[in-house]
Each structure stands twice: as C-alpha cells, then as structure tokens.
Amino acid sequence: MLNFASLPPLSLYVHIPWCVRKCPYCDFNSHEARANIPEQEYIDALLRDLEQDLPRVWGRIVHTIFIGGGTPSLFSPEAIDRLLSGIRARLPLDQNIEITIEANPGTVELERFKEFRAAGINRLSIGIQSFEDEKLKALGRIHGREEALRAAEAARAAGFDNFNLDLMFGLPGQTVEQALADMRTAMALRPTHLSAYQLTIEPNTLFHARPPALPDDDTAWEMQSQLQAELAAADYRQYEVSAYARPGYECRHNLNYWKFGDYLGIGAGAHAKITAASGITRLWKVKHPNEYLSTAGAPESIGGEQQLSRHDAAAEFMLNALRLVDGFPSPLFQERAGLPISACEPELALAENKGLIEWDARAIRPTPQGRRFLNNLLELFV
Ligand SMILES: C[S@@+](CC[C@H](N)C(=O)[O-])C[C@H]1O[C@@H](n2cnc3c(N)ncnc32)[C@H](O)[C@@H]1O
Ligand code: SF4
C-alpha cells in the first residue's frame, strides 16, 4: 500500500492532435490535417472528456494548464476561448494559474497572439527548432528563419512577457558553431525560457526509416556544454536536462511533472496521473482523433488504466525527479511516491558510489557526471 499525508498539486494537459504537415523526426500523437479540422466538435469532445474525469479530482484546484500537440495554434482564438471558459466552469483554477499554448511559426500572427492572450493564455511556447533555412528544410518544417523571428517578435508585441522558444541541436550536418549561432539568435529575442533538445531518431518516423547523417556523440556533447555555458552567462539557468529559464520563469507545468505531481489529460492519447488515498492511477485516452471524437466522455474513450505498484511509484518518481538539476528534497519522495525513502536505499547508495548522485541535508541531486550519463543513472531505478 502507498501512503499519502496529502495530495500533490494538480495540472491539466490538453492535447490537440493536428499539424499542417507531419515532420519526419516526430513521434508525437500528431496527424496531418488533410481536410478542415473539426474544431468545434473537438472542443465539445474535450469538455465531455473533462466532465468524465471530474469525479477523480473533486474539490482540487488546478495550478497549470498546458495546451500542447500537435499544433494547437491551428485552432482559432474563439475555439481556445470556448475551451478555457468550459474548463473554468468545471474546475476551480488557481488565481495565479499558468496557462501555456504551443504555437508553431507559420501558423500565427500578431492578431492571433493578441486574441489568445485575451482568452486567458499567459504563456507561449514557440517551436522554433532552428533559425537556419537549410536546417528547417531538412527537418521538414513549414517555416523558415523569417517566420521564426516574426513569431517571437509577435509574442512580445502581443504582450506575452512570458514565452519559451524550443530549439533542437544535433541537426543533420550541424556544426557546434551553427548550434551556437541558433542559440545566440534565440537569446537576442529575450524569451524568459529556452528549451534545447538534442534531436533523437525515434522508431516509427521517416528519419528512422531513412536516417540523415547526424553529428557524433562527442560533437553533440560539445554542443550541449557550450550551449549551457552561453546560456548561463546570459542568466538562463539550466534546471532540467533540456530546460533553461530566467530566475522565476521555470515552466511550472513541466516542473509539476518532474516533481511527480498529478495531472489530468484530456484529448486524443492524453495521459493522466492521479493520486488518491488508495494509490496512484495512470490512465490514457484513445489515441486516434476519429476514435477519440466518437467516444470522448464515454468509458470507451479510456485507452487504458493502471494502478502503480510500489516499485513503479518509486521508479517513476526517480525517472522524473533526477532530471532536475537541483534534484529533490528527500521528504518529497514520501509525499509523492507514498513510500519512505529507505525503499530506494540500495539504488541510491549504488548511484552515490558510482559518483552519479550527491545527497546532502537539502537535496538528492544528480552530479555533473550523473547529468552527463543520465541514462546510466536512471537505469539503476528501473
Ligand atoms: C510536443 S513538440 C511539438 C511542438 C510544436 N508542434 C512544434 O513542433 O513546433 C515539442 C518539442 O519537442 C521537440 N521535439 C520533437 N520531436 C523531437 C525529436 N525527435 N528529438 C528532439 N526533440 C524533439 C521540438 O523541439 C518540439 O518543439
Ligand atoms: S509540427 Fe510539431 S507536433 Fe507537428 S509533426 Fe512537427 S514536430 Fe510533430
């Protein structure tokens, strides 16, 4: 049995599963929008889906909402407004709630950003990936350098003082200098948050079938180290493997995942994790947009549901929390995984002996070595 003195903070994830075009490296649940997107039907489905989930979280306050995809910025501001009004009518929201939407360059302009803001969105996450036309083409993106720059400038002009830019590095044929140039351009746009993801080749993608020539591991590590150093010098502090923020602008929604908080997930393929006195449940919705549209709100929309075992709860906590540069205070383990930290004593001791974590009065955190070889560290807990 897991044992909880209190419930963790609650977030809400909303998945929008359509894109203009499927990128050859992407394994997210996203589908090329061949015809018109059934926007109104999808918003109705999301709200039915939320209704069905409500009994799992009665009385709990939502602290963050993240509308991700896919390309949520393909949805009209009116649709996003109706979605947020519907959520407000059904769930108590924190007064200082963070509400993020993902936006792709090439699908947004100043007016649309202003209307998203008026609807209640207070944070943008823009998928830049690179500022080089040639690299963007190799990634199959629908935008070029100009649209990328314009999207970031429009975010600020629309009044978003809190926005993130997603960049990828380790791109086909990329040099360390090119990766740095992309990051310098991003920093010059003065976002509050930057994400730098190393391009990975995922199964079931076009890049997996026909892999492009990528920089080798040492070059990718060189990129990561130099990016970190330049970001740190510009006051963007790394707080997770791929996430950098100005002080106080860490993404609260993602931090809640990494600290093993709870979240509802509505939309095609969306995942949820909910703690109750009896334990931790994971559940997910059916993945395909058409199946989701026809079942949302009914039990058939649940793709699966699983109670976490003691072992799963401990392992999943570590897999998340050890991604954080500051690690976690040891009492958080009992609070969120429902077990005493002694349940992980042998694995923690081994990780410490290998020089992968350090443990003091304030926190258990990965060492620089642990961050460099994060997979070796996380494997110890699986
Ligand atoms: C949920 S995705 C979608 C965001 C948005 N649709 C876009 O592509 O601009 C969030 C981010 O994950 C990153 N990403 C997606 N696939 C990746 C891959 N194979 N390797 C590394 N990063 C990836 C990209 O930086 C992307 O912006
Ligand atoms: S736009 Fe984003 S979500 Fe859509 S296919 Fe490309 S990477 Fe995936």
Image (cartoon, helix red, strand yellow):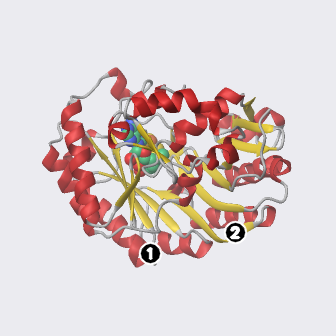
Task: Identify the mark at residue 94; answer none if there is no mark.
Answer: 2
Write down which quadrant ligand 1 falls in. Answer: top left
| Amino acid, disc 2 | Asp
The relative height of residue 208 versus residue 332 in the rendered view (above or below) is above
**From where the camera sits, is residue 36 visible?**
no
Image height of 36 relative to 146, above or below: above
The residues tagged by marks 1 and 2 sit, at their Cα atoms, a distance apart of 20 Å
Describe residue 147's horizontal placement relative to residue 342 as left or right. left
Q: Which numbered circle lies on residue 161? A: 1
Amino acid carrying mark 1 in the image: Asp
Q: Quadrant of the N terminus?
A: top right
| Image spot of residue 78 (x, y percent) | 62, 67
Q: Is residue 110 left or right of residue 334?
A: left
Give the structural element (helix, strand or loop) at label 1. Answer: loop
> Regarding mark 2 in the picture, which secondary structure is present there?
strand
Towards the viewer: 354 or 186: 354
Q: Is residue 109 visible?
A: yes
Residue, x 62% and y 61% (percent of image)?
Answer: 64
Q: Residues within 10 Å of mark 1 (few under 14, many from 20)?
A: some
Front one among 92 and 268: 92
Left or right: residue 112 compared with residue 37: left
Give the image location of residue 230, x and y in percent.
Answer: 22, 58
- Does residue 239 sit above or below 233 in this rendering? above
- Which numbered disc flags the more N-terminal residue, 1 or 2? 2
